[in-house]
């Protein structure tokens, strides 16, 4: 069994009415989810998440690694994949999607994200994220 690992984050920003989450629509598969990508060489999880976020969205972020959720699934026969998600807050950059990998991207009110997110495991990550925010 081949093992793969990707890292990304639930990126948020404060608004007058609460929080918005940045969702991206992946070109490969057309699903709505969070920015993420494969770990390269000797990168740490945090370095991978920051790099992939910058590449896919044009944004820089401050990672909150006290929120760390791992999702494991099989993307294809003979492959198991771990995806590590952190919480993140936008710190800079200009929102611009990576055309090759992201077909759309939008800020969505935290309370409305479940209507966009495609997969149940991503909705579960959002539930954990909401619980995490309430505990802070």
Image: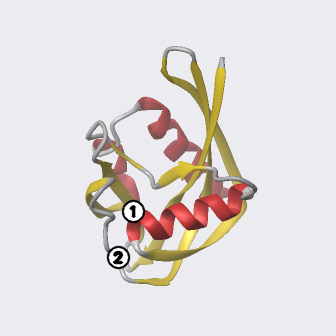
- Provide the secondary structure element on which disc 2 rests: loop
Residue at 34% across / 55% down in the picture? 24
> For the image shown, how many numbered marks are present on the structure?
2
Task: Look at the image and tell me in which quarter the N terminus lies.
Answer: top right
* Residue ranking furthest to the front: 41
- Provide the secondary structure element on which disc 1 rests: strand
* Residue 136 seen in this snapshot: no
| Marks 1 and 2, the one that precedes in the sequence | 1
Q: Position of residue 98 (x, y in %)?
A: 33, 64
Residue at 52% across / 50% down in the picture? 37
User: Closer to the camera, 117 or 92?
Assistant: 92
Residue at 50% across / 52% down in the picture? 36
Q: In this view, does 66 lie above or below 79?
A: below
* Residue 57 seen in this snapshot: yes
Local crowd size for mark 2, using a 10 Å CA cut-off: few (<14), some (14–19), many (≥20): some
Q: In this view, does 58 lie above or below 68?
A: below
The Cα–Cα distance between marks 1 and 2, rounded to whole angstroms, is: 10 Å
- The mark lying in front, picked from 1 and 2, is 2
User: Closer to the camera, 14 or 105?
Assistant: 105
What residue did someone put label 1 on? Answer: 22
Residue at 63% across / 50% down in the picture? 39
- In the rendered structure, find residue 42 and report the number of the disc placed on it: none
Q: Where is residue 57 in the image (x, y as percent from the top left)?
A: 39, 68
What residue did someone put label 2 on? Answer: 95
Q: Is residue 120 left or right of residue 91?
A: left
Task: Look at the image and tell me in which quarter the C terminus lies.
Answer: bottom right
Q: Is residue 135 above or below residue 26?
A: below
User: Closer to the camera, 24 or 4?
Assistant: 4
């Amino acid at each position: 069994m081949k093992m793969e690992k990707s890292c990304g984050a639930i990126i948020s920003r404060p608004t007058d009415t609460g929080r918005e989450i940045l969702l991206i629509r992946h070109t490969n598969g057309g699903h709505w989810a969070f920015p993420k990508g494969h770990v390269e060489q000797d990168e740490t999880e945090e370095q991978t998440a920051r790099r992939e976020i910058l590449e896919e969205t044009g944004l820089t972020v401050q990672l909150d690694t006290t929120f760390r959720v791992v999702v494991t699934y099989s993307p294809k026969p003979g492959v198991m994949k771990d995806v590590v998600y952190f919480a993140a807050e936008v710190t800079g950059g200009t929102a611009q999607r990576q055309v090759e990998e992201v077909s759309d991207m939008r800020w969505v009110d935290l309370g409305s994200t479940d209507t966009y997110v495609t997969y149940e495991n991503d909705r579960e990550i959002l539930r954990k994220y909401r619980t995490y925010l309430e505990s802070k």
